[in-house]
Image (cartoon, coloured by chain):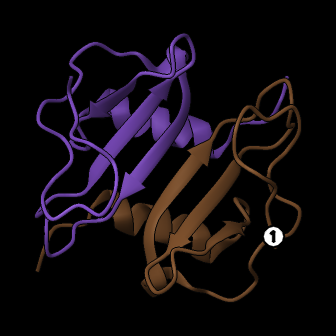
Chain colours: A brown, B purple
């Protein structure tokens, strides 16, 4: 389990981030700005296959590319 | 109500997008890539105040800036 429970959080949700580039397997992505409970912004991706939630590293180049790709995505 | 119910969606979730720049009031943002059920990507923001969900226009400049700002956010 790489993230904590849902609900009102008083700490960061991510414990560990995904190191593999899993961009193609992502159903949706949640962006949580840095706030008083967590000093870095957090990215939580939901996987298509099993709806598993995994945390992504906001500093990783492949993650930034995935976000850009989603932002400009249109159905082919 | 500017978006449809949660759950497995067979259509776009957003009906209407927020026209006002509400960046400062956003608790988190969900990015949903374009898929077979919805031809454009969708951005759903949850507001800090009341946890209301509002849809944002992915083409709007202020929305792109909000996403960039969140991506680079650190606690001050």
In the rendered image of this protein, does residue B11 appear above or below residue A21? Answer: above
Residue depicted at 24% across the width and 22% down the height: B18
Which quarter of the figure has residue B48?
top right
Q: In which quarter of the image is residue A15?
A: bottom right
In the displayed structure, does residue A1 sit left or right of residue B69? Answer: right
- Picture quadrant where residue B39 is located: bottom left
Instruction: State the quadrant of the C terminus of chain A.
Output: bottom left
Compared across the picture, whether B40 is left or right of A40 comes to: left
Q: Which residue is denoted by mark 1 in the rendering?
A: A2
Q: In the rendered view, does A69 fall on the left or right side of B18?
A: right
Residue B34, position as x, y percentages in the image: 22, 66
- Above or below: residue A43 compared with residue B50: below
Q: Position of residue A22 (x, y in %)?
A: 56, 85
Which quadrant is home to the N terminus of chain A? Answer: bottom right
Residue depicted at 57% across the width and 35% down the height: B69
At x 76%, y 83%, the residue is: A19
């Amino acid at each position: 389990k790489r993230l904590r429970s849902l609900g009102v959080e008083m700490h960061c949700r991510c414990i560990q981030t995904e190191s593999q580039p899993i961009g193609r397997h992502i159903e949706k992505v949640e962006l949580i700005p840095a706030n008083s409970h967590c000093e870095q912004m957090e990215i939580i991706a939901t996987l298509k296959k099993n709806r598993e939630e995994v945390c992504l590293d906001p500093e990783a180049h492949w993650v930034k590319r995935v976000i850009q790709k989603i932002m400009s995505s249109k159905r082919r």
